Amino acid sequence: MKKTINVAIGGCSFTIDEDAYNTLNDYLERFKAALDSTSSSAGVMDELEVRIADLLKGRLGGRQVVDLAMTQSVIGELGYPEGYNPAEEQTGKEEAPKEEYHYSGTDGEKPARKLFRDPDGKKLAGVCSGIALFLNVDVVLIRVIFLVALICGSAGFWIYLVIWIAAPEARTAAEKCELRGIPATAENIKRFSRGI
């Protein structure tokens, strides 16, 4: 028999066993300690908790209680904060640094990209910037294409307007990661919550 605790993670209520709670709480405390003590650190922690809640919801299925294996799986997908290596703590040795982006999908594939409007690089509505990030091309090229399409006829205006209406704005750090086709790990969430 295990003790369970009701907790709120990212605005969602979960029933979690005591071992899983201790592991997740330790992870969040280590991540919080790794952040600068700025006003944006609260926003980063909120974004991280929302991402954890999304991942836990996806793993729960028909189950009622979050267990230690689920928590470790979520932590493994998000990764540890920069400068903290759990293997180093256990063995006392430093491991080689990892790549900047680790793709933890099935068979090592990159996460799928999704089209959003980019609020960080916008001039008008973020459509050109969002398309450029989605296609991984220079934003100037996309803006020139829209300008030429507008000058040659009104097609550029109508296409821009349709994309403006159809594509949502990337508001959360997880959506900004999805726009760029990178995983929404804890380190990437921290990077995009601060606004690169």
Image: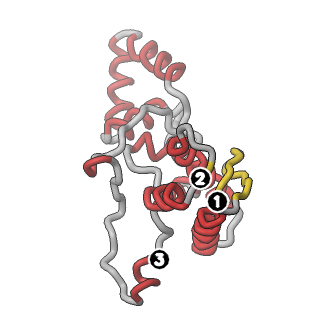
In this rendering, would 118 be left or right of 109? right
Give the tally of numbered discs.
3
Res. 66 mark = 2
Residue 143 visible, this orientation: yes
Res. 27 mark = none
Does residue 116 lie above or below 91 as drawn?
above
In this rendering, would 89 be left or right of 147? right
Residue at 45% over, 16% down: 157
Residue at 43% over, 40% down: 179
Res. 17 mark = 1
Q: Nearer the viewer, residue 41 or 95?
A: 95
- Amino acid under label 3? Gly
Residue 118 image point, x, y percent: 50, 38
Residue 4 image point, x, y percent: 70, 58
Q: Nearer the viewer, residue 84 or 150?
A: 84
Residue identified by numbered label 3: 83
Distance of mark 2 from mark 1, alpha carbons? Answer: 6 Å
- Amino acid under label 2? Val
Point out the tag, 2 or 1, that comes first from the N-terminus: 1
- Amino acid under label 1? Asp
Would you call the spot at circle 3 few (<14 residues within 10 Å), some (14-19), or many (20 or more)? Answer: few
Question: Decide: marks 2, 1 in contact (CB < 8 A)?
Answer: yes
Point out the tag, 2 or 3, that comes first from the N-terminus: 2
Distance of mark 3 from mark 1, alpha carbons? Answer: 29 Å
Task: Name the quadrant containing residue 92.
Answer: bottom left
